[in-house]
Amino acid sequence: MHTDLEQEVRISVIIPTWNAGPELGPLLDKLLDQTLPPLEIIVVDSSSDDDTVAIARSRDVRLLGIDKRDFDHGGTRNYAARQARGNVLAFFTQDAMPAHRELLEELTRPLLDRSVAYVYGRQLPRDDASLLEKLVRGYNYSEEAILKSKDDLPRLGIKTFFCSNVCSAIRKELFDQMGGFASPVIFNEDLFMAANCILADYQVAYAPLAKVIHSHDFSFVQQFRRYFDNGVSMRSNPQVHRYSSVNNEGKRMIVYLIQELTRMKRRRWIPKVIVESIVKFVGFQLGKHYDRLPESLCRKLCSSDRLWNKVQMLQNEATPM
């Protein structure tokens, strides 16, 4: 193991949970058995009614609890970060399974470069993931390491800010300097943090050797709701959203998927690619213009009625007194 990492990095792992299920145990065990062991693991639970709390208590972790009505993608992580004792914060979701013992070592290694603020790892699809999901993961999470900075904005646009708290790390000092994650926020707390770092002249690193197993086969309805949430969150952050018109990342992915499916002679998947792309586009556009829709409809389109209350909080904060 790199001795500089041992000397400089003390990791506080933070995992928000809600009804995490039996996979939480193996996740915690794998994180505790890393070649670069974490200083601590903080599980912040949103009033689970399954065995999540019992599983966490049976391991050497710190357990924090909140009411599930208070959960917020940014605020809940900020709450755990304030309790953290390490100088590096590593964020994981409850369904991100470490693929190897060197995960934390590879995830934090780029932070030895002080110009790097934020790092995210590679997401590998589950064995039972659909062909389309495997192709999408491969497109978004390649084998090539990437360093992104303000200089990439003209070329990459909003893709410059892409980052994922499924598996990420940031120096706590810088996290605090940036004011923590945006809160309240309905979606994209990781992307907004990456944007803040890059616009402050830091770099964001993609570390493909830091691997977790994580994928979802969402239905059309689930995809629509996720992209509706995405559109709403972008509307709440115009400083970031203004870069979304610079590139055509969505179109490039569609072309890539169709080409790969054709090459693999799996053309029967192409109609699903097209329909799913339309669903995502419509969901995102409606989310961007949610203020023109009845609130009752927005609550139905949003992924969570509880999270929609966060949107109202954002509106209230933006309204002059």
Image (spheres, helix red, strand yellow):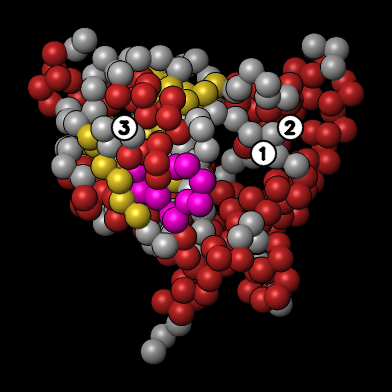
Location of residue 248 (image quadrant): top right
Residue at 59% x, 41% y is 247
Kindly tell me whether residue 108 is visible in this rendering: yes
Q: Amino acid at mark 1?
A: Gly
Give the extent of the magenta segment. 43-52
Q: Position of residue 267 (x, y in %)?
A: 87, 20
Location of residue 277 (image quadrant): top right
Contact check, label 1 and label 2, Cβ < 8 Å: yes
Q: Amino acid at mark 2?
A: Ile
Q: Secondary structure at mark 1?
A: helix
Q: Residues within 10 Å of mark 2 (few under 14, many from 20)?
A: some
Residue at 29% x, 55% y is 79
Per the image, the residue denoted by label 3 is 59
Q: Main secondary structure of the magenta part?
A: loop
Per the image, the residue denoted by label 1 is 250
Q: Secondary structure at mark 3?
A: loop
Q: Position of residue 142 (x, y in %)?
A: 53, 20
Q: Position of residue 135 (x, y in %)?
A: 67, 22
Q: Looking at the picture, does residue 85 appear above or below residue 185?
A: above
Q: Amino acid at mark 3?
A: Arg
Sooner in the amino-acid sequence: mark 2 or mark 3: 3
Task: State which mark lies toward you, 2 or 3.
Answer: 3
Kindly tell me whether residue 113 is visible in this rendering: no
Task: State which mark lies toward you, 1 or 3.
Answer: 3
